[in-house]
Amino acid sequence: MGASIRRWTKQMKTIIDIVYNSNVHLTADEIYVEARKVLPNISLGTVYRNLNKLKAQGMVSEVPKGPLNTYAKHPDSNAHFECEKCHRLYCIPMDMSVYDLSRKSGFQVNRCSLNMSGICKECEEKASED
């Protein structure tokens, strides 16, 4: 983990509130749009800098979704599934203990994630109806 957060700025507080009040993964651009409703002068660069600080502290998780990264509250499931048709991102409950991975591999594992892709149940059902 990086250096601890020494002080909570209103920008950081706004960003973490947006992420933690969302039930879906958000891109930095989506967070920026929401943050501007509260802080009209916030810049996209400020959003990215604060997301990186929050990620380094383990307070938000970053998950790739296609070519973009998305952000969600932490702890969130460390396994994710992206539908190749509708591109929705789902959290998959999986027990991936970094302690167990460290013990079994002999490496000091600090973080792990698993990204899967395929067709979600809704898209599969739509396809079978056609």
Image (spheres, rainbow, N blue to C red):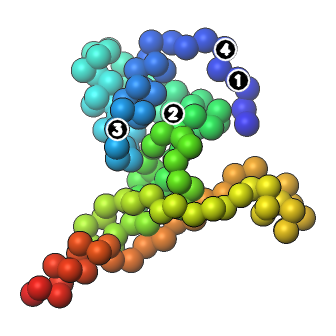
Q: Name the residue that disc number 3 marks.
A: 22
Q: Position of residue 78 (x, y in %)?
A: 57, 56
Q: How much space separates mark 4 and mark 2, taking CA atoms?
A: 15 Å
Q: Residue at x 23, y 72 (%)?
A: 122
Q: Residues within 10 Å of mark 2 (few under 14, many from 20)?
A: many
Q: Name the residue that disc number 4 marks.
A: 6
Name the N-terminal-most of marks 4 and 3: 4
Q: Residues within 10 Å of mark 3 (few under 14, many from 20)?
A: some
Residue type marked 4:
Arg
Q: How much space separates mark 4 and mark 3, taking CA atoms?
A: 25 Å
The secondary element bearing badge 4 is classed as loop
Q: Within the image, what quadrant is residue 17 found in?
A: top left
Q: Within the image, what quadrant is residue 26 found in?
A: top left
Name the N-terminal-most of marks 4 and 2: 4
Q: Position of residue 19 (x, y in %)?
A: 41, 34
Q: Name the residue that disc number 2 marks.
A: 51
Of residues 84 and 77, the one nearer the viewer is 77
Against 93, is 123 above or below? below
The secondary element bearing badge 2 is classed as helix
State the residue lying farthest toward the left: 130
Q: Name the residue that disc number 1 marks.
A: 4
The numbered dot on residue 42 is none
Of residues 93 and 3, the one nearer the viewer is 93
Are the residues at dot 4 and dot 2 in contact (C-beta closer than 8 Å)?
A: no
The secondary element bearing badge 1 is classed as loop
Q: Residue at x 9, y 87 (%)?
A: 130
The quarter of the image holding the N terminus is top right
Are the residues at dot 3 and dot 1 in contact (C-beta closer than 8 Å)?
A: no
Against 72, is 48 above or below? above
Q: Position of residue 92 (x, y in %)?
A: 48, 63
Name the N-terminal-most of marks 1 and 2: 1
Residue type marked 1:
Ser
